[in-house]
Image (tube, grey):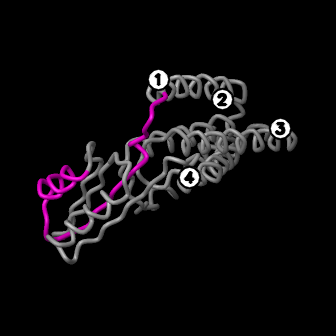
Amino acid sequence: MKFEDFLLEFSGDITSHQQFLFNAIATAVLAYLLGMFYARYGSAVSNRKKFGHNFMLLALTTMLIIYIVKSSIALSLGLVGALSIVRFRAAIKEPEELIYLFFTIGIGLGMGANQTVITLLAFVLIMSLLMIRAMLIRRPSIKAPENMFISISTTELNVPDINKILSNHFPFIELKRIDQFNGKLDVSFIIETDDVQNIVKAKDQLIEKAPKLNFSFIEQRNLSV
């Protein structure tokens, strides 16, 4: 048999429209639940709620691609060639973000391959483990410093200087992220404080040392994200 004939003859039965619709709805629901979970229990400093809104579209797109190409080797090879020219420029700075993206893609792959039961079981298992871990990590406490962030952008100060100034005003600080590009330093800290005046004093002292400094404070303790 010629290779061209093999490509033409290799075609599977396309899943019924009803099954496709069911899998699409299930994919959307699972991705939506995953996005809600990530927004609530994720630890990334970035806007988790906004990032989680992408999960549904990513899962459904992945499912659609798998549904289309799984019936033909020719389409599969064409997909490899098409994706080889795609370049993604969005930087993934948090490993957690990448893990959740792979989880979302896995949902789309499983549903697209019509492995509905396996995908549902895997989703329940993984989400249960994540929920248990979240419950163990986030035990009830009076304060929630992990949801109070200070972001600083400067070309005049270094990390030890910033750390020293913040330590004078807050009982708890933790360096979360460092980015440096073209001489510009961007740092993010988790802080703990009960007095907004401490934030104002820290900001004023930082600006006194570096007048061109950019200062940002994000308080999320009362949000469900």
Circle 1 crowding by C-alpha within 10 Å: few under 14, some 14–19, many from 20: few
What residue is pinned by disc 1?
Answer: 136
- Return the residue at label 3: 19
Residue 107 lies, with reference to residue 45, above or below; the image says above
- Which amino acid, mark 2? Thr
Mark 2 or 1, closer to the camera: 1
Q: What element carries label 4?
A: helix
Q: Which of marks 1 and 3 is in front?
A: 1
What whole-number distance in Å separates the C-alpha atoms at marks 4 and 3?
Answer: 30 Å
The CA span between labels 2 and 1 is 26 Å
Where is residue 151? Give x, y as percent. Answer: 32, 60
Callout 2: helix, strand or loop? helix
Mark with earlier residue (2, 1): 2
Residue for badge 4 = 49
**Over which residues does the magenta segment extend?**
140-169
- Mark 4 / mark 3, whichever is N-terminal: 3
Q: Quadrant of the N terminus?
A: top right
Foreground: 162 or 195? 195
Q: Earlier in the sequence, mark 2 or mark 3?
A: 3
Give how far across and how far down residue 36 sits, in percent.
62, 43
Quarter assignment of residue 145: top left
Q: Kindly indicate whether the residue at mark 3 contacts the one at mark 1 (C-beta within 8 angstroms).
A: no
First along the sequence among labels 4 and 1: 4
Query: How far separated are the C-alphas under marks 2 and 3?
Result: 15 Å
Q: Where is residue 173 in the image (x, y as percent from the top left)?
A: 26, 45
Q: Residues within 10 Å of mark 2 (few under 14, many from 20)?
A: many
Going by the image, does 79 lie left or right of 216? right
How much space separates mark 2 and mark 4, taking CA atoms?
24 Å
